[in-house]
Amino acid sequence: GDSAAHVRSKVTAEVVNAEHAYRFEEVHHSAEQGRNELAAQAMRDSDDLIKSIEAAAERKRLEREAKRKEEKKRRDAEFAARQKARSEAAAKEAGAGFGTGGEGVGGRGSADREGESQGRSKASEPP
C-alpha cells in the first residue's frame, strides 16, 4: 500500500504543479494582454490628442487668415473711398476753375495763357 500511496501522492503533486503552471501562464498571458490593450489605448488617446491639437491649430490658422482677408478688404474699401473722394474733389476743383481766370485743368494761370496768345512763352523772355 505504501507504494500505491506514494504513486498517488506523486501524481497529485504533478497535477497540482501542472495546475499551478497553467494558472501562472494564464495570469502571465492575461497581464500581457492587459498591457497590450493599455498600450493600444494610450496610442489611440495620443492620436486623438494630436488630432485635436492639429484641428485647433488649423482652426486658429483659418481664423487668422479670415481676419487678414477681412482687414485687407476693409483697407481696400477705405483706399477706394479716399481715391473716390480725391477724384471727386479734383473734379469739383477743376470745374470751379473754368471761366474764372484762376488755375484750370492745365495748372496755369491767366498770365501764362496771355503770354502764349501773344506768341511767346515765359521761357523765352529775358530775365
Image (tube, rainbow, N blue to C red):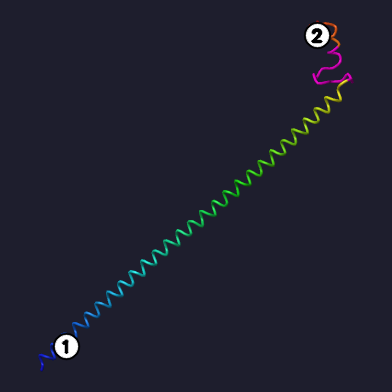
Image coords of residue 112 (percent x, y) = 83, 13
Image coords of residue 47 (percent x, y) = 45, 58
Q: Which residue is drawn at 29% across and 75% down?
A: 26
Q: Which residue lies furthest to the bottom in this view?
A: 1
Residue highlighted by disc 1: 9
Q: Residues within 10 Å of mark 2 (few under 14, many from 20)?
A: few
CA separation, marks 1 and 2? 139 Å
- 52 left or right of 31 in image: right
Secondary structure beneath dot 1 equals helix
Residue 121, label in figure:
2
- 37 left or right of 8 in image: right
- Residue range (magenta): 99-113
Amino acid carrying label 2: it is Ser
Judge by depth and name the residue closer to the eye, 127 or 84: 84
Query: Principal SS element in the magenta part?
Result: loop
Residue 63, label in figure:
none
94 relative to 127, above or below: below
Q: Residue at x 24, y 77 (%)?
A: 21
Q: Which residue is drawn at 81% across and 30% down?
A: 89
Amino acid carrying label 1: it is Ser
Q: Which of marks 1 and 2 is nearer the N terminus?
A: 1
Q: Which residue is drawn at 86% across and 23% down?
A: 97
Secondary structure beneath dot 2 equals loop
Q: How crowded is mark 1: few (under 14 residues within 10 Å), some or many (20 or more)?
A: few
Judge by depth and name the residue closer to the eye, 2 or 77: 77
27 within the magenta span: no
Image coords of residue 83 (percent x, y) = 74, 33
Image coords of residue 118 (percent x, y) = 85, 6
Asked which quadrant contains residue 42, the reply is bottom left
